[in-house]
Image (cartoon, coloured by chain):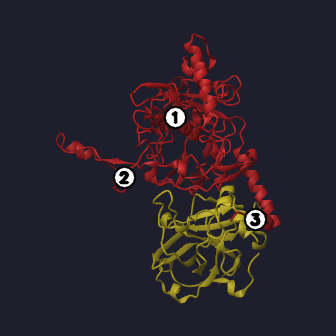
Chain colours: A red, B yellow
Amino acid sequence: MPVDQKQLTDREKELANELQAVKDRLRTCKKQVAMVMDLNKCIGCQLCSMACKTLWTQIEGREYMWWNKVNTQPGKGSPKDWERMGGGYKVLFGGKVRDPVRGQLPTRTDFGDNWKFNFEEVFASKAGGKHLVASNPDGSAPNWAMNWDEDQGGGKYPNAFYFYLPRICNHCSYPACVDACPRNALYKRDSDGAVVVDQERCKGYRFCLEACPYKVIYFNFIKKTSMKCIFCYPRLEEKVANACARQCTGRVRFVGFLDDKAGIIHKLVNVWKVALPLHPEYGTEPNVYYVPPLSPPALDEQGRIDPQKERIPMAYLRFLFGPEVEGALRTLKQELEKVRKGGKSELMEILIAREWKAMFGPFAADPAQLQRAPSKG
Amino acid sequence: MSNNDQSQQITASKLSASRKELLDLGAAAWTRLKSLRVETTATPLANQPSPYIKATFDEKVIGAVKELQVKAVHNGQDIFFYFEWGSENPNYTIGDVGTFPDGVALLLPFKGPDQTPIKEMGSKDFATNSWYWRPDFEEKPKNQIAHGLSTSLYTQETSLVSVSKWEKGTWRVVLARPLTVKEEAVNLTPGTETAIGFAVWEGGNGERGGVKAFSKEWRKLMLEA
């Protein structure tokens, strides 16, 4: 039963306004950083995941977390079946009203738990005597993990298909997690719009996990607080791009400020309109955008190429990226065709990313060159 | 506003029992003392400091625990609160993402209870102190200070201790502390009175944070001289 506004006392109305003003403040930022990931270039190597893991999630109950992960699409993703877990908003009246949608909490095995391996047993046994086996902390055999359904994809032979979808926190402009937290522990940083969890305020109530429709928040069972991708803000402060972006071998990820009119992000998102948010219908206005995957042509039963038919069903791409995906793919194809015919395309030049550092806008500093005081002395 | 009904007062009788004796759920004092039955009810959705909770939770479902039995004693040094309430399936720890531990808490105003809104855990100028027990706090309950909804913070130090047991559908918890402590908290003095409120969480019902059952009004707490 929703709150009946007519039944509220004056104090309750006043309080509601005060609380709303706090939320409005927590979700505003002076500048918004964003990321564009070109799915046509992602090879699913998980170097981004490993860069993130190495930097942020090896310690203190974070071991099972993947603040960055690469899922195979179509697939159940991680946590398993996250797209069926609700959360986000029902957007009404052209965005004037956002009605929060109740979400479900995943289980730790839906994420893929912190596996233990029988390394000692294997080491102490004769060659081939014992094999490496993973088990969950409770001893059970794992039955899900990050990218568990790797390369399974969808479609039917000879038109089976898959592609990769790297996922981080979307650092939304209307973050459901910020709205959900009764402690005001979540907020957008003023300087870059990264959504972070104040670990001093968080009491581990997990309303944020429930409300996030992308299910990218993790619960730390040791610290009893919620944790998530922080968009590498300590690196951004030093003008260094995110670890996932710098580590990417496929030159998939562009980083920059969305409102920087001369920047690549603005060009891809607002000018060329080829970079789209994942599940825009969730109503949170993500700041991570994807260049949708171009499809290989379909094959007929004899194995002949049918250039008129695409192997990735448009309905599936619309499901992921919304109705704008058709226009984005049309633009990509047109520009690709232009280059194939010997012409020039600004869009293709950007996406090819010949100059690696140009992908990172104002965050092109080399972390190895930073002048940093030694931690002691 | 406090409840002035005499039958709704809690008197912390003075006993000569030791801390060790009273930190025992089977202590004679706990069997002998009459308890105050405190009705608890769902926290109002309208006051939830989360638009998400406000829009998606149901006040009828919140507040699974409808009543709490409370007893209190002091021995001149320490004060002890005894709680008893029904909970069919106890939640002890955060075993999984969707598991929430049961809990109980008491709330004390720093200043006049009449100016301290219990429904909002105090206000900017009228702070509250809560003693927050959960089975996963491992007998070291949290001492909290709040200046209104969503502002409560644990103090670094806590002098609170507890013992607890769940048996046959009932939680029994003793929460104790020296009458006077060093950390930021409401100090209590024998021979005086103040006000007290309560909250209780049924973890199995998804209750945590402000999603809980609570006593809507302050009760008078008298400390025997």
The disc labelled 2 sits on which kind of residue? Asn
Task: Find out whether the residues at labels 3 and 1 contact each other: C-beta distance under 8 Å.
Answer: no
Q: Chain of mark 2?
A: A
Estimate the x, y position of residue A138 in percent, counting from the top left. Answer: 36, 57
- The CA span between labels 2 and 1 is 36 Å
In the picture of the structure, the residue carrying the numbered disc 2 is: A136
- Label placed on residue A4: 3
Residue of label 1:
A375
Q: Secondary structure at mark 1?
A: loop
> Marks 3 and 1, how far apart in space?
56 Å
Name which quarter of the figure residue A30 lies in: top right
From this view, report whether residue A154 is shown above or below residue B51. above
Q: Residue at x 68, y 84 (%)?
A: B8
In the rendered image, residue B27, in percent from the top left (x then y), is placed at 48, 83
- The picture places residue A71, in percent across and down from the top left corner, at 47, 39
- Which quadrant would residue B7 be assigned to in this image? bottom right
Looking at the rendered structure, the secondary structure element under dot 3 is: loop
